[in-house]
Image: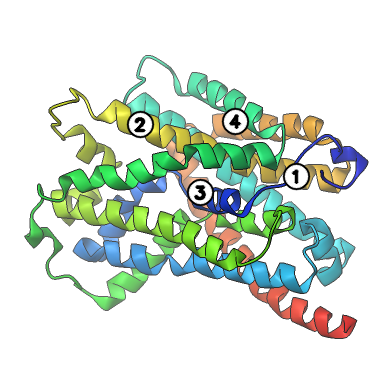
Amino acid sequence: MIKGDYMKDVSNKITRFQYMFIIQASMIGLGILSLPSSVCDVAQQSGWIPTLLSGVYPLFITFVGYIIHRNAKFLDFVQLNNKLYGKILSYVICFVFFVYFLLQGSLVTAGFANVLNFSTTKFLSPYSIIIITILLTFLSTNEGLTNIGRLAEFLFPLTVLLIILPLYFINRGDSTNLLPIISDYKLILKAMPDTFFSYSGVEICFFIFPFLTSKKKINIFSAIGSLITITLYTIVVFITIYYCGFNLTSKLQYPLLYLIASSEIPVLSNFEPLFIFLWGAKIFLTVSISGFIVTYIFSQVTKIPYYKSCIVSFGLIFLLSLFFVPDYNRTFFAGLLIPIMFIFVFLWSLISLLLSFIRKGVSK
């Protein structure tokens, strides 16, 4: 149970395997559909290489996050920042993370609604899809992190299927689409920031380390969870380029959907609904994870009970999702705010790592 009367009815304890599944699921968003287009637009046929190399980000974040919490005796996030930065700066930092995950949840929800309206559920408006998504994710989040951990554990086999399904096209592409393997080193480096953003969400580790029932060898579980998503993204980009070529891939809004829709499987008349179902289940989990962090920060800072905070948090996600339904709003604000937040999180992790060693030395 979580300390503090305002969260007394919420269970947040999770196992190491549940933690691993949450880390893996936190990074699954629209990137799996749109990432091939953005990286091929810059790195051309080498787009799968920056996707693989950028996987260093989640590995770095989870490792640094563990060291910070270990040095601070696994305090919860608010207390951790109070210890490292003082109360005033701690509130500022918590506010920035609150906005960061609020944007994550809202952007993913709005993008998910647009993709469904674009593909399989054209009879539903994006706004109807958002309402359904918010209700389902609220129900999975209002009981706390333990419930999300169980859900992540239950849905993990869907990730395995998402990795296996693109391999169906391994013998249907053209190897010349991948040549030369390295077109330009500068273009590969230039494409990496776009792929970094696809791995955002892994920052949830900063909040959930204290709730692990066992912290032995947790870096191994962090690495495995990150590597699963890195493998998934790399395979998707690689297969898409292999099948479509970088020219077509860079011009498509959702290259993976194009790839899926063009498939002909004897058993299935239409492969796309199955893929959307598998991916959609992971999206519900991703939004639930973002919603938990938003709720947790809001409850910890305001001392409002978790359930009431959950209603407020998902109300905000709902309103922002409605605003982000138009593609212009979503792409403009994502391009403007997410890079800023991303840089802030990266700097916070480095500075906090240094301060955690300093504070540890002082306390000794």
Q: Are marks 3 and 2 in contact (CB under 8 Å)?
A: no
Is residue 27 found left or right of 52 in the rendered image? right
Where residue 279 sits: x, y (%)? 40, 36
Q: Which mark is residue 137?
A: 4
Considering every residue shown, the one lying at the far right of the view is: 5
Label 4 vs 3, first from the N-terminus: 4
Q: Which mark is residue 276?
A: 2
Label 4 vs 2, first from the N-terminus: 4
Give above or below for 235 relative to 33: below
Q: Nearer the viewer, mark 3 or mark 2?
A: 2
Q: Nearer the viewer, mark 1 or mark 3?
A: 1
Q: How many marks?
A: 4
Q: Amino acid at mark 3?
A: Ala
Q: Residue at x 17, y 70 (%)?
A: 181
Q: Residue at x 21, y 25 (%)?
A: 270
Q: Which mark is residue 334?
A: 3
Give above or below for 241 relative to 64: above
What's the distance in space between the residues labelled 4 and 2, CA to CA?
17 Å
Callout 2: few (<14), some (14-19), or many (20+) C-alpha neighbours within 10 Å? some
What's the distance in space between the residues labelled 1 and 2, CA to CA?
30 Å
* Quadrant of image for the C terminus: bottom right
What's the distance in space between the residues labelled 3 and 2, CA to CA?
23 Å
Q: Nearer the viewer, residue 78 or 192?
A: 78
Q: Which mark is residue 296?
A: 1
Q: Residue at x 18, y 22 (%)?
A: 269
Is residue 281 found left or right of 143 in the rendered image? left
Q: Amino acid at mark 4?
A: Thr
Q: Nearer the viewer, residue 278 or 352?
A: 278
